[in-house]
Image (cartoon, helix red, strand yellow):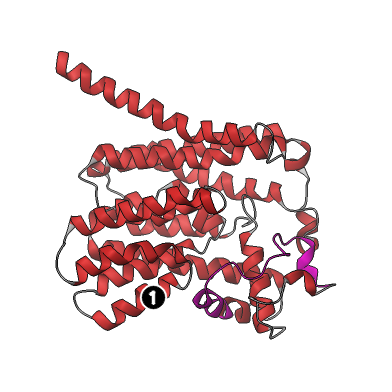
């Protein structure tokens, strides 16, 4: 177990340092740290990423599946995970954090409506040099736009401070989500809090999906005691991203006491997994969308096959970054390779699980 923990944290530390190899050449604010490594040595970058990812998931798998022998304080491990990854470069795998900052600047600096005004219209703004999707209006709900006022104002007009204010803001919701899971069922915490997909997409890439899921979980947490706040919490979640609209039927059944206990989390996980599978019809199957269903599957820990399957699937989703990382191309064979890399770990795991079951039968 000690070896697993050492491997886990060594991988996190390595990931934090390695993330700065992906600094955008147009990001003038951090040009002193720009090395061009990820552009000049794409194959090596992919290999290093694969090595880190494999070490993280392997150590996480061992920790979760041997948690009865787990003696280290969980709170300290989660805190150390946060500290190590907080200092990582947030645009290693995704540029979404720049879009959050740009949209907030349109709303709270230029005092314009981000649902009507395109970022590209602010010619000369330094953020346009490295922000993606500048030809699109705001991509998220109004509650998210309102919330971004907090880290944007905290940044006091300094880009680096603003960047890490947004990271800190996301960290708070990661902590809040872990807290809620702990309050609902302490035995579910490790699966969510240490899942490499969750910690990378939340504590490194700073995706706002964790904010959406915090309010969704809060709605279920308050449903028995503070029903009005519970309703507003679910509404807040929906007004960040509309994916949690799919939780409404489960929420209503729970509200009316038609389902309770683990059934709530099972149906919630199934609902969010369903909308996750629908996401390619809108745009693409992004790895961080798995944060929509992982918090609910954390409560289904008695089903070891399911939880291990989710962990393996998380690994496959994180492998989706490799084809573009290696080639710099989203077209051609890249979509095929991404699909294969996503599915292959699941197929191998299921074949292994079936073999073990059959072996036990004929033993």
As drawn, the residue found furthest toward the bottom would be 111
Residue that appears at 57% across and 44% down: 14
The answer to which image quadrant residue 327 occupies is top right
Element at label 1: helix
Q: Is residue 334 left or right of residue 328?
A: left
Q: As rendered, which of 17 and 124 lies closer to the eye?
A: 124
Residue 157 position within the rendered picture, expressed as x and y whole percent measured from the top left: 71, 79
Q: As rendered, which of 327 and 81 lies closer to the eye?
A: 327
The answer to which image quadrant residue 116 occupies is bottom right
**The C terminus appears in which quarter of the rendering?**
top left
The answer to which image quadrant residue 206 occupies is bottom right
Q: Is residue 358 left or right of residue 282?
A: left
As drawn, the residue found furthest toward the top would be 362
Q: Is residue 143 left or right of residue 295?
A: right
Q: Is residue 287 above or below residue 361?
A: below
Residue that appears at 55% across and 48% down: 13
Tally of numbered tags: 1
Q: Is residue 324 above or below residue 95?
A: above
Q: Which residues are magenta?
A: 124-149
Return the residue at label 1: 235
As drawn, the residue found furthest toward the right would be 124
Residue 281 position within the rendered picture, expressed as x and y whole percent measured from the top left: 52, 50
Q: Is residue 235 above or below residue 78?
A: below
Question: Would residue 1 be seen by someone viewing this image from the given angle?
Answer: no
Q: Is residue 300 left or right of residue 46?
A: left
Residue that appears at 60% across and 80% down: 154
> Does the segment drawn in magenta span residue 126?
yes
């Amino acid at each position: 177990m000690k070896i697993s923990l050492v491997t886990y944290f060594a991988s996190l530390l390595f990931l934090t340092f390695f993330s700065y190899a992906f600094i955008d050449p147009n990001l003038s604010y951090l040009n002193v740290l720009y090395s061009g490594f990820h552009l000049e040595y794409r194959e090596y970058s992919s290999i290093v990423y694969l090595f880190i990812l494999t070490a993280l998931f392997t150590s996480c798998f061992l920790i979760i599946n041997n948690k009865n022998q787990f003696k280290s304080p969980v709170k300290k491990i989660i805190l150390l995970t946060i500290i190590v990854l907080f200092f990582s470069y947030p645009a290693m795998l995704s540029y979404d954090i720049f879009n959050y900052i740009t949209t907030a600047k349109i709303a709270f600096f230029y005092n314009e409506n981000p649902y009507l005004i395109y970022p590209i219209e602010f010619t000369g703004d330094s953020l346009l040099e490295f922000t993606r999707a500048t030809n699109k209006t705001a991509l998220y709900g109004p509650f998210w736009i309102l919330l971004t006022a907090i880290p944007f104002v905290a940044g006091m007009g300094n880009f680096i401070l603003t960047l890490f204010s947004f990271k800190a803001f996301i960290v708070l919701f990661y902590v809040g989500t872990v807290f809620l899971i702990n309050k609902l069922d302490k035995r579910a915490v490790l699966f969510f809090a240490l899942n490499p997909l969750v910690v990378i997409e939340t504590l490194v890439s700073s995706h706002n999906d964790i904010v959406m899921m915090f309010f969704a979980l809060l709605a279920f947490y308050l449903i028995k005691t503070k029903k009005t706040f519970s309703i507003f919490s679910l509404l807040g979640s929906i007004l960040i991203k509309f994916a949690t609209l799919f939780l409404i039927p489960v929420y209503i059944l729970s509200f009316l006491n038609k389902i309770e206990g683990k059934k709530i989390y099972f149906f919630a996980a199934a609902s969010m997994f369903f909308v996750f599978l629908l996401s390619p019809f809108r745009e693409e199957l992004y790895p961080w969308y798995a944060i929509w269903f992982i918090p609910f599957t954390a409560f289904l820990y008695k089903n070891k096959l399911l939880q291990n399957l989710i962990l393996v699937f998380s690994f496959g989703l994180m492998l989706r970054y490799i084809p573009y990382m290696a080639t710099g191309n989203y077209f051609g064979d890249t979509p095929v390779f991404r699909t294969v890399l996503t599915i292959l770990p699941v197929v191998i795991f299921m074949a292994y699980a079936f073999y073990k079951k059959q072996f036990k039968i004929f033993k």
